[in-house]
């Protein structure tokens, strides 16, 4: 356990854990873009779980997941941190960070406390869910942000404070290696089709469906899974018994970009999502996409002309759509904004939601910040 002391801040972001994941990537993007606009910002995690490939380590208040006594120590460290840095705004990522940090930030005198709900409420433990409901109704956080309209609707949160839907956006690093190199690294023959998925190895991601599909495409395709998580041992066993099923673990975003360029189909069978950054990266890469038919996936792929949807439990439907996508390999003709436009819109939307464009002290110090012009709307 160690305290961390930072200079006076405009925005302090708090994550539960350092690990590769959508919340962590978004926090890193916001941190970098805020700095580029002259906003004093920092990003910390409550504890370290796994390093994020391609990123410098986050400042963590604990080196591993804490027990009850460790959680108490983290709480005391957070209280001291909030008081010493005097952030004008705290941005809390995920339900655990909201449950622990919102009352501490209020106690420390932080006036603006924003809850960012990445995942659907159904994935939260019941106790954490009820704590956050109480915090919302009692004003422990003063603003809430959802990564899209579908995420807000699925969450079912009442609008007891200003509520914004800001669709996730991500800039895709350019691919550096060609398809043949990617396949050679894993030992896949050049003539084989590649079905790719990227995501945390967790039950709600429904990757078991892809293991079943691998059996049906044994003669034609290899299935490549990039990610890590609590189900790693299970999918290592799947990879051992299926020669066309490959678990590559976690990769930096540059290597993920290589595989997105190399794959023939991107498959995303998740049971529930906020607004998946992996799916947005596949869209930005122009992949042929087969995704589970849930509201957040349809929102992420809106106006994208090279996507199809199947029920997350209909393996026959998935087989038909994946087979059709593999046969029809024409380039996507979907209507998409450029990644730079998408990113700029998202950052401006966060600046607006966090009231950084109306903060008199901040404006006096660094000048006007552009107004939001992207797909952000107050609910």
Image: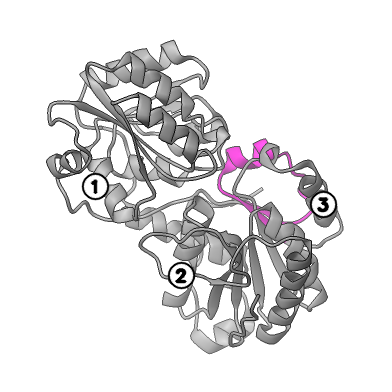
Q: Earlier in the sequence, mark 2 or mark 3?
A: 2
Tag nearer the camera, 1 or 2: 2
Label 3: state its secondary structure.
helix
Label 2 – label 3 distance at C-alpha: 30 Å
| Residue 149 falls left or right of residue 222 | right
Where does the image place residue 263, in percent across and percent down from the top left?
25, 35
On screen, residue 356 above or below 7: above
Residue of label 1: 258
Where does the image place residue 96, in percent across and percent down from the top left?
70, 55
Count of numbered labels shown in the rendering: 3
Q: Earlier in the sequence, mark 3 or mark 1?
A: 3
Q: Is residue 122 visible?
A: yes
Label 2: state its secondary structure.
loop
| Residue 178 falls left or right of residue 104 | left
Residue of label 2: 57
- Residue in the image at 25% along x and 32% along y: 332
- Residue in the image at 55% along x and 42% along y: 230
On screen, residue 363 above or below 139: below
Where does the image place residue 289, in percent across and percent down from the top left?
35, 30
Confirm or deny contact between disc 1 and disc 2 (CB under 8 A): no
- Residue in the image at 66% along x and 37% along y: 153
Any mark on residue 131, and which? 3
Where does the image place residue 279, in percent across and percent down from the top left?
41, 40
Task: Please provide the residue range marked out in magenta.
Answer: 143-164
């Amino acid at each position: 356990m160690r305290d961390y002391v930072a200079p006076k801040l405009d925005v302090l972001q708090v994550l539960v854990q350092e690990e590769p994941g959508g919340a962590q990537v978004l926090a890193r993007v916001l941190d970098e873009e805020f700095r580029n606009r002259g906003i004093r910002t920092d990003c910390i995690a409550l504890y370290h779980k796994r390093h994020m490939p391609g990123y410098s380590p986050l400042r963590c208040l604990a080196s591993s997941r804490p027990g009850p006594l460790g959680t108490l120590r983290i709480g005391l460290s957070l209280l001291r941190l909030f008081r010493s840095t005097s952030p004008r705004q705290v941005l809390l990522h995920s339900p655990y960070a909201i449950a622990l940090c919102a009352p501490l930030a209020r106690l420390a005198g932080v006036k603006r406390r924003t809850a960012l709900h990445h995942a659907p409420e159904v994935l939260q433990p019941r106790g954490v869910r009820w704590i956050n409901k109480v915090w919302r109704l009692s004003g422990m956080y003063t603003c809430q942000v959802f990564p899209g309209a579908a995420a807000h609707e699925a969450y079912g949160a009442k609008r007891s404070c200003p509520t914004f839907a800001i669709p996730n956006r991500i800039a895709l690093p350019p691919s550096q290696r060609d398809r043949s190199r990617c396949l050679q690294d894993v030992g896949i023959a050049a003539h084989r089709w590649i079905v790719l998925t990227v995501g945390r190895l967790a039950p709600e991601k429904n990757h078991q469906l892809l293991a079943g599909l691998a059996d049906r495409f044994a003669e034609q395709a290899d299935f490549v899974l990039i990610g890590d998580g609590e189900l790693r041992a299970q999918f290592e066993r799947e990879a051992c018994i299926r020669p066309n099923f490959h678990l590559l673990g976690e990769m930096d975003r540059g290597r993920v970009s290589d595989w997105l360029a190399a794959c023939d189909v991107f498959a995303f069978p998740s049971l529930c999502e906020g607004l998946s950054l992996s799916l947005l990266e596949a869209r930005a890469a122009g992949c042929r996409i087969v995704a589970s038919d849930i509201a957040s996936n349809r929102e992420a792929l809106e106006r994208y002309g090279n996507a199809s949807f199947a029920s997350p439990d209909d393996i026959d439907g998935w087989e038909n759509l994946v087979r059709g996508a593999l046969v029809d390999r024409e380039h996507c003709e979907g209507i998409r904004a450029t990644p730079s436009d998408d990113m700029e819109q998202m950052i401006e939307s966060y600046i607006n939601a966090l009231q950084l464009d109306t903060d008199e002290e901040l404006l006096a110090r660094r000048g006007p910040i552009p107004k939001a012009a992207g797909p952000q709307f107050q609910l």
